[in-house]
Image (spheres, helix red, strand yellow):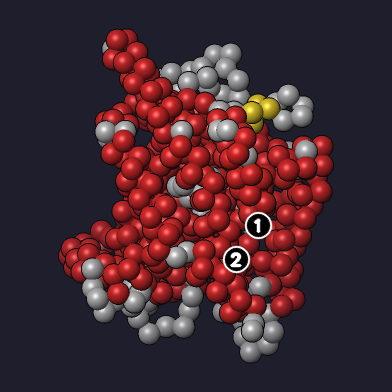
Amino acid sequence: MTLVELTQQLADMAWGPHMLILLVGGGLFFLIYSRFVPFRYIGHAINIVRGKYPDDGAEGHISHAGALSSAMAGTVGMGNIGSVAVAIMVGGPGAIFWMWISAIVGMATKFFTCTLAIMYRGKDENGDVQGGPMYIITQGLAKKWHFLAVFFCVVGLVGNFPLFNSNQLVQIIREWLIVKPGYFPSDQSTFMVDLGLGIIVMLIVASVILGGIKRIATVASKIVPLMIFIYMSCAFYVIATNLADIPGYFALIFTEAFSLNSVGGGILGTMLIGIRRAAFSNEAGIGTEVMAHGSAKTNEPVKEGLVAMLGPAIDTLMVCTATAMIILISGVWQGTESEGVNLSAQAFSVTMPGVGPYLLILCVVFFSISTIFTQAFYGGQCFAFLFGRRHIRFYQYFYLLAILFAATASLQEIVNIIDAAYALMAIPTMTSAILLAPKVREASKKYFAKLAAVN
């Protein structure tokens, strides 16, 4: 059995129908249990990010905007470009519909999980405040549940390795800046080229991640808004120049989502593919974003939950939809052997001839590098919980070496490994959030009542 076959079996086992129940069913529970109240305060959430409600003297390391930027740097990444391409190729256009559904319920999930991130923060051996599913479990649940904290951190070490983003970044640079211009023969092994590009990426990442979450947040808060602006500008141009065709593509997404003969293997197959790719894109319920928001400088849990809720709306409903439209408009998803980010690059080449692929490369550099920065923090948090923060440098060095493995591995191996780890990470994250949901609803009632009294 090959490594691809082995990892495929592991990923398929981890992403069975039980994941549909856990992530979508759990998200629907949060949506209904909250009585849709958080959704009425999206404007208030935006004002929090803008700094209108500062928390002077609060514990934490970074601002609300810094926490959202750090979390978005981890989610607005190659999952929005390469993963959407994978979703369409494997599950057909209908998979996008289920990504949307996952994002809507994911907004409720993030409200609950990230409110808990502030409510149940812990402290490391240095006395510094830290957040994440492992602290929610150990601080909020009885001892019989504490094994879930260790389980989350063990699979989190794998799930947060910089595999997918490093792989896709190296692929698009190699194909469009080295092979296509003729600097390297396309019929020869690209191992040494990939390794060389991997070393460059590793050195860039090392210059930032060794500075900790404050440096990561500083870089992310500058990069994330810019990269979203550039990418969405490209998408708006493509959509505007093909406006008459857009209703037809939306109709295709809806009809394929409920087609018994869809590419994804019927309704259930397409649904699972869409949810799987959405989880990879916005990470709602996976637990990584909980660690970023758990570092926010605030003593008001509900405020951070509201800020976190914006993530899936920006990430999946906006950015992933933009990618899907570009791929569908281009037509390259039909009858091509390209995969991942290279499929997206072909779509940009068709819809924006000449300049398109190079604008995408610029976006890919921003998307992937910022995600790699944030994943280093997430993995470091898991490592520190298990082994202590004083040893975290060992993890960071190993993390940097993983970039070299990712640069030279196949895309399918990478996707399977990360998919399996994400599914396993969701189990402790969603379990703890469901058990502690009454605490969030109680805190929400108090916060919104106080907000109404002030206004």
- The three-letter amino acid code for the residue at tag 1 is Val
Q: Where is residue 36 in the image (x, y as percent from the top left)?
A: 27, 35
Near mark 2 (Cα within 10 A), the count class, few <14, some 14-19 or many ≥20, is many
In the orientation shown, which residue stands out farthest toward the front?
144
Q: Marks 1/2: CA distance?
A: 8 Å
Lower position in the chain sequence, tag 1 or tag 2: 1
- The three-letter amino acid code for the residue at tag 2 is Ile
Residue at the spot 19% in from the left edge and 66% down from the top edge:
251
Residue at the spot 63% in from the left edge and 62% down from the top edge:
163
Quarter of the C terminus within the rendering: top left
Q: Looking at this view, is 123 or 373 the one in front?
A: 123
Q: Can residue 181 be seen in this view?
A: no
Q: Dot 1: what SS?
A: helix
Name the residue beneath numbered marker 2: 417
Near mark 1 (Cα within 10 A), the count class, few <14, some 14-19 or many ≥20, is some
Quarter of the N terminus within the rendering: bottom right
Q: In this view, does 314 lie above or below 138?
A: below
Q: In this view, does 414 lie above or below 43?
A: below
Q: Looking at this view, is 21 or 50 the one in front?
A: 21
Q: In which quarter of the image is residue 41?
A: top left
Q: Where is residue 263 in the image (x, y as percent from the top left)?
A: 33, 78
Q: Quadrant of residue 443?
A: top left
Say whether residue 64 is left or right of residue 323.
right
Name the residue beneath numbered marker 1: 158
In the orientation shown, which residue stands out farthest toward the top?
454
For the residues bearing labels 1 and 2, Cβ distance under 8 angstroms: yes
